[in-house]
Amino acid sequence: MCGTCGCGEDSHIIYRKPGAPEKGHLHYHVHPHEHDGSEHEHGHHHHHDHDHVHSHEDDHVHSEHAHSHHPAHHDHSHETSTIRLERNIMAKNDMMAERNRGYFEALNITVLNLVSSPGSGKTSVLERTLKELAGSLDAFVIEGDQQTMLDAERIKAAGAPVIQINTGNGCHLDALMVNKAVKQLEPKKGSYLFIENVGNLVCPSLFDLGESKRVVIISVTEGADKPSKYPTMFETAQLCLINKSDLLPYVDFSIEEVKEHALRINPKLSFIVVSARSGEGFELWYDWLKGLRNA
Amino acid sequence: MHELSIALSIVDLVTTEALANGASSVSRVEIGLGNHSGVIREALEFAMEEAVKSTLLEHAVIEYVSIEAQSCCQECGLNFTPEGLYLPCPDCGNPMPELIHGKELIVKSIDIETTK
């Protein structure tokens, strides 16, 4: 089942590099009609609105067996047994994240998971970073958005190889999406990989992607109490960039107040005040990035 | 919103275990939800209704067990039930007592039906 809207599709997630042709949905699901009661994913309501390559490998005669599982309710005797599992529901994502992490470690790739509310300036911070560090480090970018190639185009223009993940209706990136995207992006040994997560301060916090560090970005046009309102993201991050510092004279935002809120949740969190517009504070951000190599 | 992907993970996990044990269907799933797991029970219930369709879990009763938060102070060793998240130890004031329970997001047990 599709993980974003719950329809019968395998996936609504699109991976694309700027300039690559729109392939639409790749339906790489094969319908396993073995009728063992498993993997029944019928009822296909294909609601997409662009071209796509269908490769269904069977005839669609779903109606005939739409309810043919739970067989033999009447003729055979049933036995009920309880199995104790105590299994972590996030285990699958966490395991994939660890696989990603191992791959990155082996290739000495430093991976940053950038998270924030929509509009905090993740892409602008990245653009300036990529342009200014173009000569001194190899950078690759995974862009996560529900729709459009807009961010990927901006990153490409800033000079870094990029792949866009469009999650459809999905509110976060997960480790499997990153795993698939990395295979297409092929980041170089010893490079930095920036993953710009979907703009959302809630859901991405639960999904480890295999990153080296998580960077949460907040801008001075937001409320300074945001860390207390959305604690999980600030709890799981190692660095907080406070962006749009050039606007500080015009807004009622206290740097001290936001630090106080965030430190109450995560006493180990570091802060750098930056402006993606003016470039203020970026030297400190670059020092922090380069420092990850020596850690 | 992330509850749907969590619901699908539950269906996936339970289906794998059920099939491995030769089940023809699953009649009960017991889910443990920590008070601070980051998952809203109502949203998960709603997502589960959709996620179980056309799976072995379709007719299963889904039980939700909430798991109370429990903290332990690394400084003074006090075990206590925190009144909220991110509060200091009520005894010694250590700002970062460790949350030892309350983040759980687990499938505790399942009842499976096997046909003889």
Image (cartoon, coloured by chain):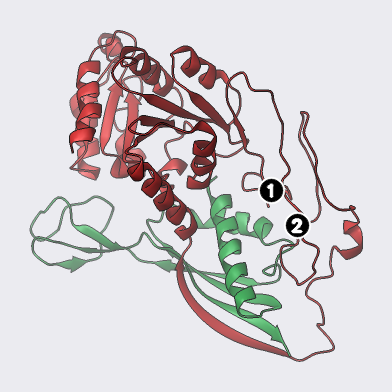
**Circle 2 residues within 10 Å: few <14, some 14–19, many ≥20:** many
Q: Quadrant of residue A104?
A: top left
Chain letter for the green part: B
The quadrant the C terminus of chain A occupies is top left
A107 and B20: which one is in front? Answer: A107
| Amino acid tagged 2 | Glu
Name the residue rendered at 54%, 51% in the picture.
B3
Secondary element at image label 2: loop
| Amino acid tagged 1 | Asp
Q: Position of residue A57 (x, y in %)?
A: 83, 50
Chain letter for the red part: A
Give the label on residue A142, or none.
none
Q: Earlier in the sequence, mark 2 or mark 1?
A: 1
Q: Position of residue A242 (x, y in %)?
A: 28, 24
Q: Position of residue B43 (x, y in %)?
A: 56, 52
Name the residue rendered at 69%, 48% in the picture.
A10
What residue is shown with label 1? A10
A46 and A179: which one is in front? Answer: A179
What residue is shown with label 2? A41
